[in-house]
Image (spheres, helix red, strand yellow):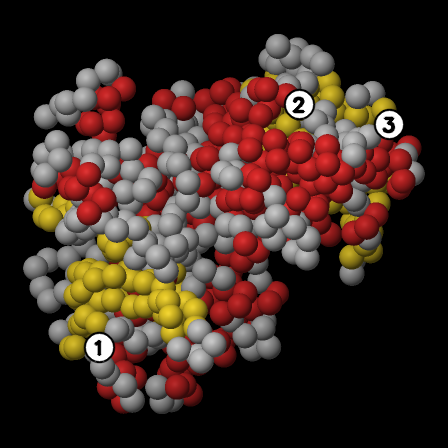
Amino acid sequence: MNTTGSTASTPILEVSEVSKSFPASKDVFGRVVARLQAVVEASLTINPGETLGLVGESGSGKSTLGRLVMRLTDVDAGRIVLDGDDITESNGPELRAARRKMQIVFQDPQSSLDPNWLVRDIIAEPLRAYGVSRADRLSATERLLADVGLEHAHGSRYASEFSGGQRQRVAIARALALEPNLVVCDEPVSALDVSTQAQVLSLLEALRDRRNLAYLFIAHDLAVVHHISHRIAVMYLGRIVEVGPADDVYNRPRHPYTEALLSAMPNPKPASRRQRILLTGEMPSPVDPPPGCRFQTRCAHAMDLCRRVEPELVAYGDVEVACHLHDTGPELAGASVTEISRGRSAGSAAPAS
Amino acid sequence: MSSHASSAVDPVLQIEDLAVEFITEHGWLTVVDGVSFEVGRGETVGLIGESGCGKSVTAMAVLGLIEQRSGRVSRGCIRLDGRDLLALDSREMREIRGRKVAMVFQEPMTSIDPAFTVGNQMVEVLRRHLPMSRSQARQRSVELLDRVGITDPHRRIDSFPHELSGGMRQRVLIAMALSCEPDLLIADEPTTALDVTVQAQVLDLLAGLQAEMGMAVLLVTHDLGVVSETCERVIVMYAGEIVETASTDELFARPLHPYTAAMLASLPGLHPDEPLDPIPGIVPPRHALPPGCWFEPRCEHAIELCGSGHPTLVAVGGRSARCLRADDLRLPGVGS
């Protein structure tokens, strides 16, 4: 999928250069002596009806970015604009109004749904909180149950009686109750078995197309993200290192980290298996990120420059990448980094065009 | 090569007609039913299926851990190097566990004691099973940590588990599991909790160690990609029984059971431009199994006959499938 689901219009979400750090340790006087940089100058744009996939490993900052967008956590710097309104500093009634337009679905429906509530009440709760009348709540709940593929009788049961897939359907119905324009999906299918995962992904796609929903789809599984997203952003140690149309990022990765991530994915199809790039070591601590490029400690292509200067996101056509290989190094200028890896394995250091 | 997809040439593990029951609100329920397969020396066999299919319970039965979980083995035979494990008492089983058969689980934090250093725990395992002095065992532990790719093993051996990352803890667990050079390693979702780049490192490590030590590996997982990349043979379970066995290449290229084919069709990423084809419905609960084939209510290839008699696992040209239509269906795989 590489076409966006939208026409030229106001983006539903514009995130510009947001940063967030958390205190990581304190001295004996309670003063913060080290900070964990969770998100560093991240920018995103999502158009109505569009799905932006946000991928990265644990500690990449992807979930924190989702929480910043939802205003569940305050940003340290940067702006968040929802449907044309700056909500960075909003609170009280303003934030309440904004929350009608954006909702979130979490990974583990077991912990995000109250086990003592009937499913019908869980779904209707946002409507009650926003003063929708009882009669309207009842009819809306019935519609929502049907929309997410649950039966009328399911409404009178407890979420704890449900399977993981059914609970995730309830969580989706609740998120859609206020008819939001944007849904942040934080690892919505990671806890599910493969057949249930496919059911929930198909449901999310159908709802998106029917309601022109925009998704910020956060996941660690690149195959899942590629399947559902129009565009993909890749995060590493708090920074977005690559963003572009889903097929481009998936098939022609520009950043060495994206390439390594793709090659590490276990692939059930032997013929399409990529040459594996085994990264050495693990992600450095976000409390003490390496100087220069954050990926340089594990990058097979790291140059002297990479150890000193942090690369900026540079646009090449539809794709943006933060890597010196593109603006300085062997001058990939937006070409796939796989070209270098192939050139190397063929015994030549020069990248093919 | 094996003559039959569930048997092995030089079997280390032989399971025959295994049935396991657990006590539930519906009384004793059979959760593993009539499972038979073998794992040969130097071979990696994948045991796959979705939550609740019985794959982990099968692994627990081999480790003799069913009684601890208020269950019982109601039928069958489990042999390790020809020795009947079900005939052993709990003391004898403890001797076998860790020495002859070792295990690596999904969450290393729950399998390592947080109160003791890595070294303490490794020395204890070694000395329990092998005649070694404390200093010999410590020396061996350092070598093992080095072998599983832990940098600076002399220092790391005195770390507490919480001081290590998830990937390193899993490496420590592998080092502990392999310390007595077991004949069989049972790895239950060994990389599921890890990030994908770390998972690749750990799978690579396991494959290297296996090639070196020649042990048999039973890999229990729900991840079809991991199975495809690491296993020679695959056993697919559904609702407590085996529904298909085949070599990995055959299984992925041409599945014989509609459940296997349906799982492959649910995988995102194989045909990115096509909509996913999810399996409708859910696995039937154990107390309400359908009368015929247990997959029949969800199967798009079911015919009337599938709803009446329960099919047996039938050998089909070196592999086996539990499906009445295994011979006449041509199910799509994922290409070779």
The local secondary structure at tag 1 comes to loop
Q: Residue at x 44, y 74 (%)?
A: A27
Say above or below: A112 vs B300.
Answer: below
Say above or below: A48 vs B231.
Answer: below
Q: Residue at x 53, y 50 (%)?
A: B164
Q: In which quarter of the view is residue B183 placed?
A: top right
CB of mark 2 within 8 Å of CB of mark 1? no
Q: Amino acid at mark 3?
A: Asp
Where is mark 2, residue-wise? B215
* Crowd band around label 3 with a 10 angstrom C-alpha radius: few (<14), some (14–19), many (20+): few
Chain letter of the residue carrying label 2: B
Where is mark 3, residue-wise? B84
Q: What distance separates the C-alpha of mark 3 from that of mark 2?
A: 19 Å
Say above or below: B186 vs A23.
Answer: above
Quadrant position of the C terminus of chain A in the picture? top left
Q: Amino acid at mark 2?
A: Met
Q: Amino acid at mark 1?
A: Thr
| Residue mark closest to the camera, 3 vs 1 | 1
CB of mark 3 within 8 Å of CB of mark 1? no
Comparing A186 with B112, the one in front is B112
The local secondary structure at tag 3 comes to strand
Whether residue A34 is visible, yes or no, is: yes
* Crowd band around label 2 with a 10 angstrom C-alpha radius: few (<14), some (14–19), many (20+): many
Comparing B139 with B101, the one in front is B139
Co-location on one chain, circles 2 and 1: no
Q: Residue A278: x and y, percent? A: 39, 32
Comparing B118 with B98, the one in front is B118
Q: In which quarter of the view is residue A273 placed?
A: top left
| Residue mark closest to the camera, 2 vs 1 | 2
The dot on residue A88 is 1
Q: Residue A129: x and y, percent? A: 39, 86
Q: Residue B209: x and y, percent? A: 58, 25
